[in-house]
Amino acid sequence: MLKSEQLSLARQLDLVFKELQEELSGLSSGTVFVQIRNNVIGKFGIRHNPLTGRSGAFSVESEGLSAIQQSSFRLMALESLRYKKRWTHGEISYEFAIIQGMIVVDATLESNYNMANLMIRYPRGAQADVGSDQLYG
């Protein structure tokens, strides 16, 4: 059995879109997010408001992304991975909407770093700029 660490990030993202296929088919807008830790997708999902209120009652959207729109969305998401540089922890959000029958996607890449990791990598005695210690220490 394969572990998620053994799959490339692109393959993991492909699996995310496969898992979200049914939910995306009922939505015309929202935000797909993937949380990444050590280049492994952990938590993922969709943020959306699928209910529309009118005259005191809610109705569910009847049309969502078609199979072709979902395929375009998945390809754009995979293409966005080319812009991920060096970082291994963070989140990628894909805000999507159907506008005049076309899917429009805005990708936001968020890198996360941990100061504790830097303190291990750059111990106090090995700092190149000792003057900064005097300012803040």
Image (tube, rainbow, N blue to C red):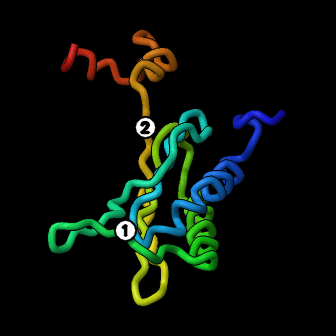
Name the residue rendered at 71%, 35% in the picture.
5
Q: Please give left or right for residue 68 compared with residue 136 in the image.
A: right
Where residue 107 appears, as percent x and y from the top left, is: 45, 63
Q: Nearer the viewer, mark 1 or mark 2?
A: 1
Residue receiving disc 1: 60
Where residue 115 appears, as percent x and y from the top left, is: 39, 24
**Secondary element at image label 1:** strand
Name the residue rendered at 44%, 43% in the picture.
111
Q: Quadrant of residue 1?
A: top right
**Secondary element at image label 2:** loop
Q: Please give left or right for residue 135 compared with residue 89 in the image.
A: left
Residue receiving disc 2: 112
As drawn, the residue found furthest toward the right would be 1
Q: Amino acid at mark 1?
A: Val
Where residue 105 appears, as percent x and y from the top left, is: 45, 71
Name the residue rendered at 32%, 18% in the picture.
130
Name the residue rendered at 40%, 84% in the picture.
99
Image quadrant containing the C terminus? top left
- Circle 2 residues within 10 Å: few <14, some 14–19, many ≥20: few
